Image: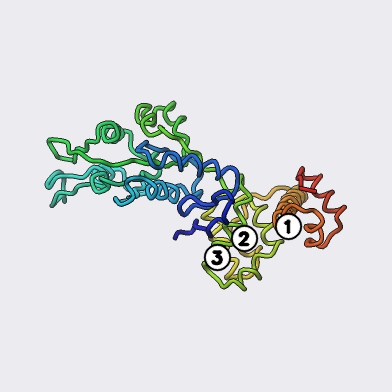
Amino acid sequence: MTDEAAALTPPGSPPERFGDAIGRSPEMQRVFSLLSRVATTDSTILLTGESGTGKEVLAEAIHRRSRRAKGPFIVFDCGAVVPGLIESELFGHEAGAFTNAVRARPGLLAEASGGTLLLDEIGELPLALQPKLLRVIAKGEVRRVGASAATRVDVRVIAATHRNLEQAVAAGRFRADLYFRLAVVVVRVPPLRLRPEDVPVLARHFIAHMASEEQARAVLTPSVNAALVAHDWPGNVRELRNVVERLLAVGDLAGALARDVPADFENYYVAKRDAIERFERAFVRVSLDACGGVVTRAARRAGISRQMFHRLMSRHGIESRD
């Protein structure tokens, strides 16, 4: 189970997970619903969204729910390999095709045959190699470097990127025909700051895998949960996991978040006001969620009057059941 995994969903409630991806927010529920419908097809899928949102986790979940589940699931990061080596890595090469090519290599597209290949950061794929990838998707054929003929492969391609490929197409940095082949189904994975309901759930999961249940209860207090929800999470789920790990290590939320505080502070009073507003909004939401939306219970839990709790709700446009 990966870092984005979660506890099983209670019977009768909407699924909080898709494979090892977790999310109870409406935004993630829509993502899970769409992926559940297309996972069993062979359609090419393009996952877009900021770094750290869990695109690789979702891609593996798609594979596990597909008819290819017993086949290989291979990940290739187009941005992590020297451009001159990408062709050999992906498409393979014949012996003697270039210097140091002592023996033939099938390439990852061939190795993933019968399964799924995730092309992470597809926006970094060199323009010169894009027609070759288009041929694989359109015709199921791969031509190794130095080969005189193509070989057949049966591979499902899932692509992921944090870049805007439509803008890249308009700028001539990405082929339009390849984009449309990849974007049969486009799934935009929302950043963590737009799905605050998922923050406490993810935090509980991460801490449960790092500490005892007693430690988890002691660390994830309502005020800590509220502060976590109020954070902007530029690094998304990956950043949240790191913060939870540091929180356990240093025992102080301010210290755990310290590495993620931006260097360019605003005016002190403006920054303080905004931080208080984010904290209040997050605290009210977390308190209501913990008390089933009942204001009287939430106010008692928070240690303030019902009237004050209502004022906070009104100030931040939050509704309840009573």
Q: In the rendered image, which residue does mark 3 sit on?
A: 245
Residue at numbered disc 1? 291
Which residue is at 57% across, 61% downward? 243
Secondary structure category for the residue under label 3 = helix
Q: Are marks 1 and 2 in contact (CB under 8 Å)?
A: no
Q: Which mark is residue 258?
A: 2
Quadrant showing the N terminus: bottom left
Q: Type of residue at label 3?
A: Glu
> From mark 1 to mark 2, how far is it between C-alphas?
31 Å
> Which SS class for mark 2?
helix
Foreground: disc 1 or disc 2: 1
Residue type of the residue flagged with mark 2: Ala
How crowded pointer 2 is (Cα within 10 Å; few <14, some 14-19, many 20+) is rated as: few
Give the residue drawn at x 33%, y 45%.
67
Q: Position of residue 71 (x, y in %)?
A: 29, 50
Q: Is residue 281 left or right of residue 63?
A: right
Give the amino acid at mark 1: Cys
**What is the x, y in percent for residue 6?**
52, 58
* Label drawn at residue 35: none
